[in-house]
Amino acid sequence: MSKEWLFDLYHNAYFEVERDSDDDVCIRQDFRIWAFPIREGEQIRFMTQFRASPAHDLAERLLYVNRVNDELHIVRAYVDRDGDIGFDDYLVVSGGVTRRNIIFATRAFVDHVLAALTKDETEVIA
């Protein structure tokens, strides 16, 4: 599995897909999602990031991501080095997985991030 293969897969599945400045695969839905082949193509990492509101300090941001991690269990939430909020998930593809499964996993990731965003009751995300 390669970046080129993933790009073609999403393009052929009618996703709005592009390459970013680092040549990574970027899908545009309601927000940007990056899909990275990792571990020599054995896994796909799905990742998205959002700017955190400067009105909320690190403790409030951590409370939010901990709530998401505690209540959702499917998508991982984190605060990055810049203090922004990120979500990611991994799909193991070694041993075999269909193109359809990758598309379904991508759509599930979008749904899980949307569910996580609904938990942002104090508007930690800008």
Image: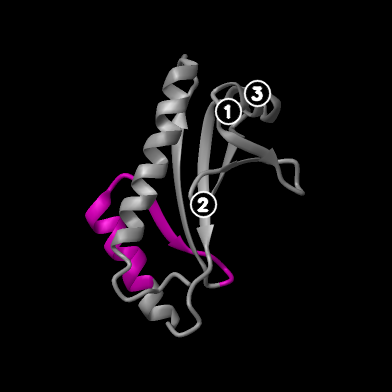
**Residue for point 52% across, 72% down:** 83
Look at the picture and state if 93 lies above or below 126.
above
Mark number, residue 10: 1
Picture disc at residue 8: 3
In front here: 92 or 126?
A: 126
Q: Earlier in the sequence, mark 3 or mark 2?
A: 3
Q: CA distance from mark 1 to mark 3?
A: 6 Å
With respect to residue 57, does 4 lie above or below?
above
In screen coordinates, is 16 left or right of 111?
right
Amino acid type of disc 1?
Tyr
Secondary structure under the numbered disc 3 in the rendered image: helix
Numbered range of the magenta stretch:
62-82
Q: Nearer the viewer, residue 2 or 103?
A: 103
Residue 17 placement (x, y as % from top left): 63, 36
Question: Looking at the image, do the residues carrying marks 1 and 3 touch, with CB atoms under 8 Å apart?
Answer: yes
Residues at badges 3 and 2 in contact (C-beta under 8 Å)? Answer: no
Q: Secondary structure at mark 2?
A: loop
The residue under label 2 is 31
Residue 66 image position (x, y, % from top left): 31, 64
Q: Is residue 72 magenta?
A: yes
